[in-house]
Image (cartoon, rainbow, N blue to C red):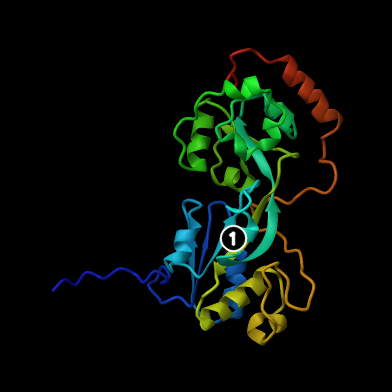
């Protein structure tokens, strides 16, 4: 007889205990503080953490390996394909916060002289991503320049693109938490202030068993900052898909550590310092430099 232990149940935790709630999260999202608070409020219950290596979160939910998942939507979702309205036809979803995008570039790149890098500064750069992911840049380019783009090298994940940036093949614009996740000493990142923000949501299936639905609703309450006495588990109405409790006003929850807030007003140093740096950067450009055509 084979005495080797069998595989864990999809929703078991790392210690092999059957999980009451399993929550997955895409790369860069850091929900640790919410996990801690939920466990503190639910002593005796087991929460399994499911960090994902890619953005393939649908498979986790559909296969039952997670009851809920922190996900990102595209900064520019396609209507009827990957927008929030389409997502909610299949899943329940609560919007949490919006994440800024940054450009990842070699540490010696001239654009590191700027405090922030507007989209206009990226027009002449090679970007290691599909043009549709940054339409703000495409609107500033001529049709001839767009037609002259070389084919992209094979890129499976953001990590691949960042490795290519380190190799000097171009630049890439990603959510700030992704840039921090794949930080390297030879790379830097700068906020792209006029790029669209990336929405982060908590998503779960519409057909969860009642017990799991109650636990997910309680977790939603933790994430959105509701007190213990007003949580779903205490008998209040469940969170609506727009992120508010039924009959009440929604609250804006601070993003997790590593996630970027949307700035209120002009960024510090975005005036004379950035302008002066930009002039210096432009004046020092050389044709054929790293990361440009």
Q: Find the residue positioned furthest to the front.
A: 80
Question: For the residue carrying disc 1, how many other residues have a C-alpha within 10 Å: few (<14), some (14-19), or many (20+)?
Answer: some
Answer with the quarter of the image where residue 182 lies: top right
Q: Is residue 52 left or right of residue 82?
A: left
Q: Find the residue positioned furthest to the top.
A: 287
Q: Find the residue positioned furthest to the bottom.
A: 235
Horizontal and vertical percent position of residue 280: 76, 19
Horizontal and vertical percent position of residue 122: 68, 28
Horizontal and vertical percent position of residue 52: 48, 56
Identify whether 200 is placed above or below 218: above
Q: Quarter of the image for the N terminus: give it.
A: bottom left
Q: Nearer the viewer, residue 141 or 36?
A: 141
Identify whether 12 is placed above or below 106: below
The number of numbered discs placed on residues in the rendered structure image is 1
Identify whether 160 is placed above or below 78: above
Q: Is residue 86 visible?
A: yes
| Residue bearing mark 1 | 87
Q: Is residue 291 visible?
A: no
Residue at image coords 54%, 31%: 165
Residue at image coords 79%, 76%: 248
Q: Is residue 224 left or right of residue 3?
A: right
Q: Quarter of the image for the C terminus: give it.
A: top right
Identify whether 72 is placed above or below 171: below
Answer with the quarter of the image where residue 85 lies: bottom right
Residue at image coords 82%, 40%: 268
Determine whether the residue tagged by mark 1 lies in a helix, strand or loop: helix
Horizontal and vertical percent position of residue 217: 61, 76
Answer with the quarter of the image where residue 275 lies: top right
Q: Nearer the viewer, residue 287 or 49?
A: 287
């Amino acid at each position: 007889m084979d005495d080797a232990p069998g595989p864990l149940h999809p929703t078991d935790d790392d210690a092999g205990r059957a999980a009451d709630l399993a929550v997955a999260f895409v790369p860069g999202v850091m929900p640790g503080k919410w996990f801690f608070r939920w466990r503190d409020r639910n002593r005796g219950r087991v929460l399994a953490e499911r960090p994902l290596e890619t953005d393939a979160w649908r498979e986790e939910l559909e296969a039952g390996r997670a009851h809920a998942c922190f996900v990102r939507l595209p900064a520019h979702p396609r209507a009827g394909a990957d927008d929030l309205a389409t997502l909610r036809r299949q899943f329940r979803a609560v919007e949490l916060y919006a994440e800024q995008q940054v450009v990842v570039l070699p540490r010696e790149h001239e654009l590191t002289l700027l405090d922030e890098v507007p989209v206009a500064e990226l027009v002449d750069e090679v970007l290691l991503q599909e043009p549709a992911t940054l339409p703000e840049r495409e609107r500033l380019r001529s049709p001839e320049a767009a037609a002259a783009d070389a084919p992209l090298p094979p890129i499976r994940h953001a990590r691949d693109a960042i490795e290519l940036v380190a190799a000097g093949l171009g630049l890439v614009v990603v959510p700030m938490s992704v840039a921090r996740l794949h930080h390297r000493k030879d790379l830097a990142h700068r906020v792209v202030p006029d790029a669209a923000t990336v929405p982060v949501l908590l998503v779960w299936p519409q057909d969860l068993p009642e017990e799991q639905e109650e636990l997910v609703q309680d977790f939603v309450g933790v994430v959105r900052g509701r007190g213990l006495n007003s949580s779903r588990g205490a008998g209040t109405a469940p969170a609506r898909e727009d992120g508010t409790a039924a009959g009440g006003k929604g609250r804006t929850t601070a993003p997790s550590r590593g996630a970027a807030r949307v700035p209120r007003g002009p960024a510090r140093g975005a005036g004379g310092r950035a302008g002066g740096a930009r002039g210096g950067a432009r004046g020092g450009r050389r044709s054929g430099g790293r990361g440009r055509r």
